[in-house]
Image (cartoon, grey):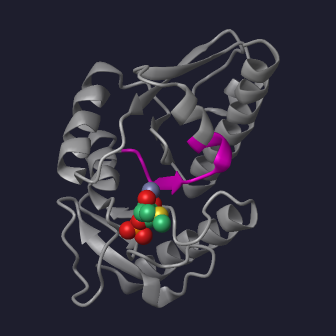
Amino acid sequence: MDPKLVETKAVEVIEAGRFLYDRGWVPATSGNFSARLDRDHAALTASGKHKGRLTRDDILVVDMNGKSLDPGKRPSAETLLHTTLYRFFPDTAAVLHTHSINATVLSKIAGNAEAVVLEDYEVLKALQGVSTHATREVIPLFPNTQDMNALARDLADRLERQPDMHGFLIQGHGLYTWGRTMEETRRHIEAFEFLFACELEMRRLSP
Ligand SMILES: CSCCC(=O)C(=O)COP(=O)(O)O
Ligand SMILES: [Zn+2]
């Protein structure tokens, strides 16, 4: 592994954490972030760290089975969701997971639905490959669980059925999204956050 690449990717992850924390989207120790290093490895946040105040020491390298290559550092409890995404999308370069109020509330009021559907919003065009507001963006919604193996399996199944998704929600928990660069992934988070706020307001005004 090229140590310079690991340093560069660690900086990307640390900066993403600051950006997301400043917007209130990763309170306390919530959220986790990663950046791909090569086909088989990613730089990922350690578990239980404050994601707005990450240091280089809080980043470790994992393989695509979720195994830490940095002994002594415990990878995120949700590592398998990151590695499932990297394995499914070879061009994915970064994965961000947030716990905003809007994602949490929307995912709870969606109840037992299989997905939250967003339609006819201009900002949908901020999602990679979307070129018109007249788009039906289906955001899968998974029940929350502490069983990451089971959730990663459910995610892998859903990806097979719906490979065009840009993100997914976990009920009462938060949002995952990804992109071909860290910049694109940060744009996806911002777009989803704006769209979730709009959707909640729409549901409040016209239930
Ligand atoms: C206090 S947040 C609970 C765990 C969680 O959902 C999360 O995103 C952070 O977990 P990690 O192990 O990545 O720190
Ligand atoms: Zn989480």
State the image coordinates of residue 37 (x, y, percent, origin top left).
36, 66
Magenta-tinted stretch? 91-104
Indicate left or right for 206 with 78 as reference: right
Q: Looking at this view, name the residue that lies furthest to the right.
A: 205
The answer to which of 48 and 57 lies nearer the viewer is: 48
Query: Does 143 appear in magenta?
Result: no
State the image coordinates of residue 63 (x, y, percent, origin top left).
22, 66
Q: Report the residue at 68% width, 33% height from top.
A: 196
Question: Is residue 4 shown above or below 125?
Answer: below
In which quadrant of the rendered image does the N terminus lie? Answer: bottom left
The answer to which of 86 and 45 lies nearer the viewer is: 45
Does residue 179 show up?
no
Q: Report the residue at 19% width, 44% height from top.
A: 150
Q: Report the residue at 39% width, 77% height from top.
A: 46
Q: Report the residue at 55% width, 78% height from top.
A: 50
Quarter, ligand 1: bottom left
State the image coordinates of residue 194 (x, y, percent, origin top left).
74, 37
Question: Is residue 49 shown above or below 161?
Answer: below
Indicate left or right for 109 with 131 as reference: left
Indicate left or right for 142 with 33 as reference: left
Question: Is residue 35 shown above or below 175?
Answer: below
- Residue 83 figure quarter: bottom left
Does residue 200 show up?
yes
Indicate left or right for 123 with 163 as reference: right
Question: Is residue 97 shown above or below 66?
Answer: above
State the image coordinates of residue 159 (x, y, percent, origin top left).
31, 29
Number of marks drawn: 0
